[in-house]
Amino acid sequence: MELGGILKAIALILVSSLYAYFIGGMIPYIVLYLSTALLVVGFLGAKINARITAYCYTETMNAQVGSKIKVVLEVKNESRWPVPWVQCWVKMPETFYFSDNFGCYNFSLSPYEKVRIYEEIECKHRGRFNWGRILLRTGDIFGIFTRSWPGGEEQVLTVLPQIYDIGEDLGELFGRRYGEVPSSIHPARRGSSFLGVRKYDVSDGISRIHWKASARSQRLLVKEFQEQKMSEFTIFLNLNEKDYSGKGPDSSSEKAITLAASLASIGVRKGHGVGLKVYGQENMFIPVGYGKNHFSLMLKSLVQAQLGENSSAAESIGDDISILSTIGCPFVIAGDVDSDLAAILIRLNSRGQRTVLMVLAAETYEDNAADFGDRDWEITHLRASGVPVLVIEKNTDLRLVFRGQEYDVS
């Protein structure tokens, strides 16, 4: 029982008693007795109404920025007495951008009644968010005696970066024809696709004989395959705090992370080997790998990625320049480009390892009076040296970047 309600009841009885004592007569004492009786009923009612349970859950604990998830709040009256009013505060994930990150619900309950409340809310920010704790509050019909107690269990909601379908072929970055693997993306492994059968040759191994087709045609036939080269690349995501601008989901750093996730998605989907290196609050490195499980690992790393104070793109990539030749074509995502970074990328390009640079135009994400003349000059220098550069602005639709409909990156 909350102390405030008890103090209110004592004060009310005291005032009624003083009123009856000094005024005298029947009516003041009737008011005293009725007030006392109502307070006793309210006190007992508040004690009875405390048998309420509540918990909150969702259909999934993994979502994606831009997706909507259904949150269910379930409250049940465990007693045989009706509950005139219940207030329920639910700690919501910060990705929903609720006021104070709490959802507040009010209702009444019949004996043994269970109420479910459904909310479909959009996830607006990536990250791992604790939520699900509940504070219940109820009391008597007059609102004098109230009780509050916690409920629910704390849960964790993981919101992955938004992923755009940015095209079908990363070769668009190099001005290549659709389906042609750029020579600057290093061959990593080989696969094969079945073409048909042909006549057996003495140089063919026994394992290649197609026994069913041979039986039907009464002659030896072998399987014929077309060899396919698979390729690999590594995404370098530099999250230097001073190079990015904007706040929340619309910041340039969030768009950089979305771009990295989208690049990884198309790479894995098209069978490329993809690696990821993040320079930020914490440096993370995932070697080149293949398949959905490897992609999930990269997404989990991007969920945790945060801006850092000492993560210069030039210094970070310069430190790793000795291993670049072993991890495939580098895709560099940065918030700015200086002369040191440009020199490194030009040097890599001269060695035959073509690197793609993607720069987030920080000034388009908020009013920024900084001079970006040096950056623009370095971008011109890079393009003149044969290094493809994309400039990503706030209004850039990432779904069009690699489809040749918005930027000329040749």
Image (cartoon, rainbow, N blue to C red):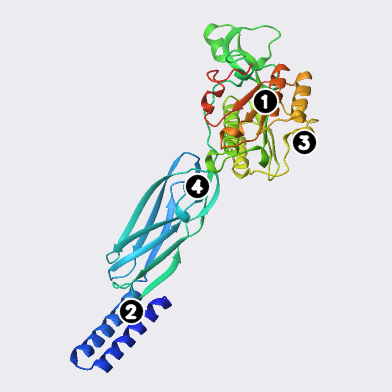
Asked if one can make out residue 262 in the rendered structure from this viewpoint, the answer is: yes
**What's the residue at 58%, 24% (across, down)?**
270
User: Label 1 belongs to which residue?
Assistant: 376
Query: Where is residue 254 shown, x and y percent of the image?
Result: 57, 38
Asked if one can make out residue 325 in the rendered structure from this viewpoint, the answer is: no
User: Label 4 belongs to which residue?
Assistant: 95
| Mark 4 or 2, nearer chain start | 2
Under circle 2, the secondary element is helix
How far is disc 3 from disc 2 in space, using C-alphas? 69 Å
Tag 2: Cα neighbours inside 10 Å, few (<14), some, or many (≥20)? Answer: many
Under circle 3, the secondary element is helix
Given residues 54 and 352, the one toward you in this image is 352
In what quadrant of the picture does the N terminus appear? bottom left
How far is disc 1 from disc 2 in space, using C-alphas? 73 Å
Give the label, 4 or 3, closer to the camera.
3
Asked if labels 1 and 3 touch by Cβ distance under 8 angstroms, the answer is no
Tag 1: Cα neighbours inside 10 Å, few (<14), some, or many (≥20)? Answer: some
| Mark 3 or 1, nearer chain start | 3
Give the label, 3 or 1, closer to the camera.
1
Mark 1 residue type: Asp
Under circle 4, the secondary element is helix
Residue 19 as seen in the image, left or right of residue 164: left
Residue 144 as seen in the image, left or right of residue 239: left
